[in-house]
């Protein structure tokens, strides 16, 4: 079973959020529906702009921590490497 590290954005070059989940589809719906109080609900961060699958939860958590330690420019470069248009990947990948 895959584990996912993902990034959400409020808009192109907007507020970013990095998270980890075992069910990307469910988690994306939770963010979009504002079902869970917190950062993404407060700041309107609900566009899935990047995701990466991992074989274990430990690998996914390690990658999440790595990305969270990066500066903003590195995160934007990672997003734009695979999703230059900042498209909502929830519409095409889930």
Image (cartoon, rainbow, N blue to C red):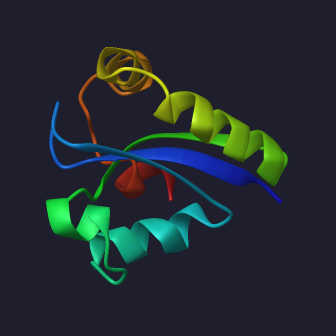
Q: Which residue lies furthest to the bottom in this view?
A: 35
Q: Is residue 79 above or below residue 48?
A: above
Q: In which quarter of the image is residue 83?
A: top left
Q: In which quarter of the image is residue 22?
A: bottom right
Taking depth in this image into account, of 65 and 13 the one nearest to the observer is 65
Q: Which residue is drawn at 50% across and 59% down?
A: 94
Q: Is residue 69 above or below residue 39?
A: above
Expressed as whole percent of the image width and height from the top left, the position of residue 90 reads 40, 56
Q: Quadrant location of the N terminus?
A: bottom right
Expressed as whole percent of the image width and height from the top left, the position of residue 53 reads 68, 43
Horizontally, is 13 left or right of 35 in the view? left
Q: Which residue is drawn at 34% across and 20% down?
A: 80
Horizontally, is 6 left or right of 40 in the view? right
Q: Is residue 15 above or below residue 36?
A: above
Q: Which residue is drawn at 31% across and 71% down?
A: 38
Horizontally, is 62 left or right of 10 in the view? right
Q: Residue at x 49, y 28 (%)?
A: 69
């Amino acid at each position: 079973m895959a584990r996912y590290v993902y990034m959400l954005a409020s808009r192109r070059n907007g507020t970013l959020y990095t998270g980890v989940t075992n069910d990307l589809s469910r988690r994306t719906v939770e963010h979009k529906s504002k079902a869970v109080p917190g950062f993404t609900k407060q700041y309107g961060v609900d566009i899935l702009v990047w995701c990466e699958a991992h074989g274990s939860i430990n690998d996914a958590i390690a990658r999440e921590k790595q990305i969270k330690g990066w500066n903003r420019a590195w995160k934007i470069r990672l997003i734009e490497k695979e999703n230059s248009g900042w498209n909502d990947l929830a519409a095409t990948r889930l």
